[in-house]
């Protein structure tokens, strides 16, 4: 029930912003998700006993996304410099690192790139000439993949996919999830994105399905490494914002480059 209520709240907001909101409004939505995602990521790392430069990571991540939104490569590079230099300089004058300065600095930088860098591809998708439709394509493929993989795996799953990372994932659920991403690409072609050819539907649908599954497993790897069950609590029935965006993080760059190849920019 919590999953249904969460969807009833968040999906209409997302649809309204993408379909009728400005590019600026959409960026604010993405930036909010990036900020919350980075906060959760750094919470996971600190719960593991490793200090991070949280402020530098969040500011750097948001600056990176802003540079992508504004089309300012200089700002993107400045954000990278920020998340590399500031954590190292901070730990130079801090006793908090306790011998973990290198790991803390590296994970501060990794978090900014993992969350803001990958989610920033959604901003790049929105900037395409057919940007609204591109965003809907991405979300439709990922949503159908995750939904069908979850319920299909529960109904027919027998063989574990990666028991060390996620006990609930099955091989059968993975195949059903791939069918879901293919279905999403097909629905997009038949309704709002006719530029997708038949071959593009198959290639893009399968590629995004694989990327979404890997994104989910990658976040499970991070949680298991830090001993956490969920990345947070902000989304009722799902855990944290990263638990909702994990598939999207890997699928977004795949969709962006795939669309550039099959449709163009």
Image (cartoon, helix red, strand yellow):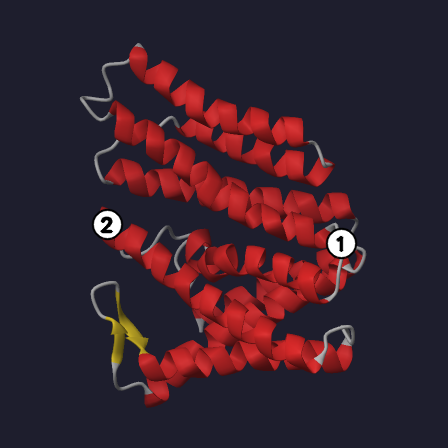
Quadrant the N terminus occupies: bottom left
- 209 or 228: which is nearer to us? 209
Q: How dense is the environment of label 1, judged by Cα within 10 Å: few (below 14), some, or many (20 and up)? A: some
When the figure is inspected, residue 150 is found, relative to residue 221, above or below; the finding is below
Residue farthest toward the bottom in the current orientation of the protein:
156
Q: Secondary structure at mark 1?
A: loop
Where residue 140 sits, quadrant-wise, is bottom right
- 146 or 183: which is nearer to us? 183
Q: Residue at the spot x=23%, y=14% of the render?
A: 95
Circle 1 residue = 128
Disc 2 vs disc 1: Cβ atoms closer than 8 Å? no
On screen, residue 16 versus residue 160, left or right, reads right
Give the alpha-carbon distance from disc 2 to disc 1, as whole Å: 37 Å
- 257 or 158: which is nearer to us? 257
N-terminal of the pair, mark 2 or mark 1, is 1
Q: Inspect this view and state whether residue 4 appears.
A: no
- 61 or 210: which is nearer to us? 210
Where residue 192 sits, quadrant-wise, is bottom right
Circle 2 residue = 225
Q: Inspect this view and state whether residue 224 appears.
A: yes
Q: Position of residue 49 (x, y in %)?
A: 21, 35
| Camera-nearest label, 2 or 1 | 1
Q: Position of residue 74 (x, y in %)?
A: 65, 26
Q: Residue at the spot x=25%, y=77% of the render?
A: 160
Q: Position of residue 101 (x, y in %)?
A: 26, 23
Q: Residue at the spot x=40%, y=44% of the render?
A: 40
On screen, residue 90 versus residue 180, left or right, reads left
Q: Residue at the spot x=75%, y=57% of the render?
A: 131
Q: Secondary structure at mark 2?
A: helix
Q: Position of residue 81 (x, y in %)?
A: 50, 23
On screen, residue 110 versus residue 227, left or right, reads right
């Amino acid at each position: 029930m919590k999953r249904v209520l969460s969807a009833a709240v968040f999906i209409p907001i997302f649809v309204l912003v993408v379909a009728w909101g400005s590019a600026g409004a959409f960026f604010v939505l993405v930036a909010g998700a990036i900020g919350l995602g980075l906060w959760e990521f750094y919470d996971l790392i600190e719960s593991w006993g490793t200090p991070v430069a949280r402020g530098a990571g969040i500011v750097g991540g948001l600056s990176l996304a802003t540079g992508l939104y504004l089309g300012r490569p200089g700002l993107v590079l400045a954000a990278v410099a920020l998340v590399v230099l500031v954590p190292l300089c901070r730990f130079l004058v801090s006793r908090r690192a306790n011998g973990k300065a290198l790991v803390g600095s590296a994970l501060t930088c990794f978090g900014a790139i993992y969350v803001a860098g990958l989610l920033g591809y959604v901003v790049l998708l929105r900037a395409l000439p057919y940007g609204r439709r591109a965003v809907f394509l991405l979300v439709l493929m990922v949503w159908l993949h995750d939904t069908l993989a979850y319920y299909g795996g529960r109904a027919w799953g027998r063989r574990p996919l990666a028991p060390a990372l996620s006990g609930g994932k099955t091989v059968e659920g993975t195949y059903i999830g791939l069918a879901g991403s293919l279905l999403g690409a097909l629905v997009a072609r038949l309704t709002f994105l006719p530029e997708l050819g038949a071959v593009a539907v198959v290639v893009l649908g399968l590629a995004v399905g694989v990327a979404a599954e890997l994104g989910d497993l990658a976040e499970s790897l991070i949680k298991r490494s830090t001993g956490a069950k969920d990345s947070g609590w902000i989304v009722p029935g799902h855990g944290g914002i990263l638990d909702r965006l994990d598939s999207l993080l890997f699928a977004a760059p795949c969709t962006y480059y795939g669309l550039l190849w099959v449709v163009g920019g």
